[in-house]
Image (cartoon, helix red, strand yellow):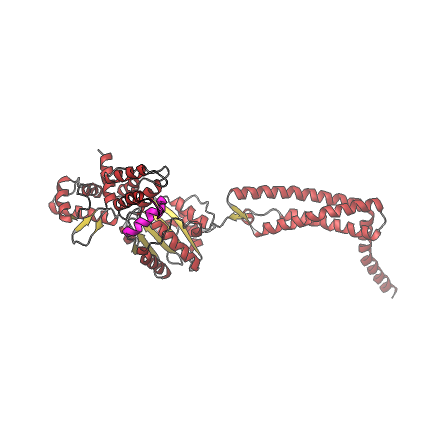
Amino acid sequence: MEDIVIGIGGKVVECLAGPILDRARYLFCFKKFIGELMEAEHVLKRRLEEVKERMEQAARNSEEITLPVKNWLNDVEKILENMQELQQKAEKEVKSCLNVSLKYSLAKQMDNNAKRMMELKKESYFEKDHFSHLIQLPGITHFSSKDFVDFKSRESTYKDLLEAIKDEKNKMIGLCGMGGSRKTTLAKEVGKEVDKMKIFEKVIMVIVSKPPLNVTKVQQDIAEQIDLKISDQTPLARAQRLSNRLKNKKILIILDDVWEYLKLEDIGIPLVEGCQILLTTHLRNVCGFMGCKTIELPLITREEAWELFKKHANLRNDSSNMFDDIGRKIVNECKELLIAIAKVGSSLKRKPIRAWESALSRIERGQPLNVAEGLTNVNACLELSYEGLSSSTAKSLFLLCSMFPEDHEIHREDLIRFGKRTLELEESIVTMEDARREILYALDILLDSYLLMSIEKEAHVKMHDLVRDAALWIAKKQR
């Protein structure tokens, strides 16, 4: 019995000893707790500065800190806010030493805060991938609508494009049209509308541009817009990483300004899953090679061309008849070629009438326009299409077509007859039938590139006036 009592008593003493010793420690080692608290605060503040430096580096790399880091910063901010008040109370209590209960409470708070600050320091060593990630780029919503003009003649094209995208069976859609016809602008606007409709998780846009294809740049542009880091050295490894991220995701990828057949798996774009492609090109045969549902962008009407010119030239409805008359003549010369109308109109904004007369004279003579600095020369833009032709025979035939009079309806047989005598055909061409086949193939290339236009007259083609001017300009440069 005595042993039992002694055992119980020992347990009671053991249970009471801990709290009593802690209480005594808080009362008699008060200054020690102040010192430990200040040391913990100093260590945490120093670590906070290191974390902030890391945040600045992430910001320079266009990276955003993760939620755990943000929560850590909030916790640090809260505990440091309480420090000044706690230290002031502790220093006051050191001087008075009157309130034992308050002294105990303060010592306990300081001990807990010091321990918490040391815990926060330990929690601050985030792994690289857990500290920050690339800022999610806005995708298609980034692009401005200021260049978009809602032409009545293009309403059906806009609707057709929208319906084609909404149909999940169309994995690839191609928007093709003449260089400078604003395919890119229309694709952006349709993409923004699709984004608003929430048909896809995200709509992104990537500029492909003139060959040779820069696979690395295209991969990087896609990765940045879907918040993916790809640092792999080989294109294949990057393609695999992209493909893994895009699989089973419903994303519309707009590939702008495509000049040639693209092997999408080499880039990392999977078509068997939820991805859908809208590409823009001035080459109709690219749409065929890629297996696209093809939608062609027509030229605008003459009245729409006039309204567009007025917008870019800042020509008000109450402008003098002199500006109005010359402006309409300029638009007539530009026909319905959007890039010409926009560039010429912009270059004449707030210019005197003599500048307008000079512009009209130069267009009528087929000379390059002195457009304002920063604006692309119309001829230079069309020259890009010419340089992109895959066939030397097609290039020669293009220059030959410019020898016909303005607005002339060119018969295909005339091109074959003249072409046999004047064009530099391939050395392998030996028979008249071979030559005929080669010229007709070159003619198809020009039609597919929108450098020639089909007309209602059977077996005839036509060259847009400004395209003809560009061809004459190119021919003169090559002399």
For this rendering, which residue is in front, 156 or 5? 156
Where is residue 447? Give x, y as percent.
Answer: 23, 49
For this rendering, which residue is in front, 465 or 359? 359
What residue is shown at x 82% (from left), y 45% (from top)?
A: 94
Region in magenta: 301-320
Image-based side of 123 in relation to 407, left or right: right
Where is residue 367? Give x, y as percent.
Answer: 26, 37
Where is residue 263? Give x, y as percent.
Answer: 34, 50
- Residue 115 counted in the magenta span: no
Where is residue 164? Give x, y as percent.
Answer: 34, 59
Using the rendered view, name the quadrant where residue 51 is placed.
Answer: top right
For this rendering, which residue is in front, 123 or 51? 51
- The answer to whether one can see residue 415 in this image is yes
- Residue 318 counted in the magenta span: yes
Q: Quadrant of the N terminus?
A: bottom right
What residue is shown at x 45% (from left), y 53% (from top)?
A: 245
Q: Main secondary structure of the magenta part?
A: helix
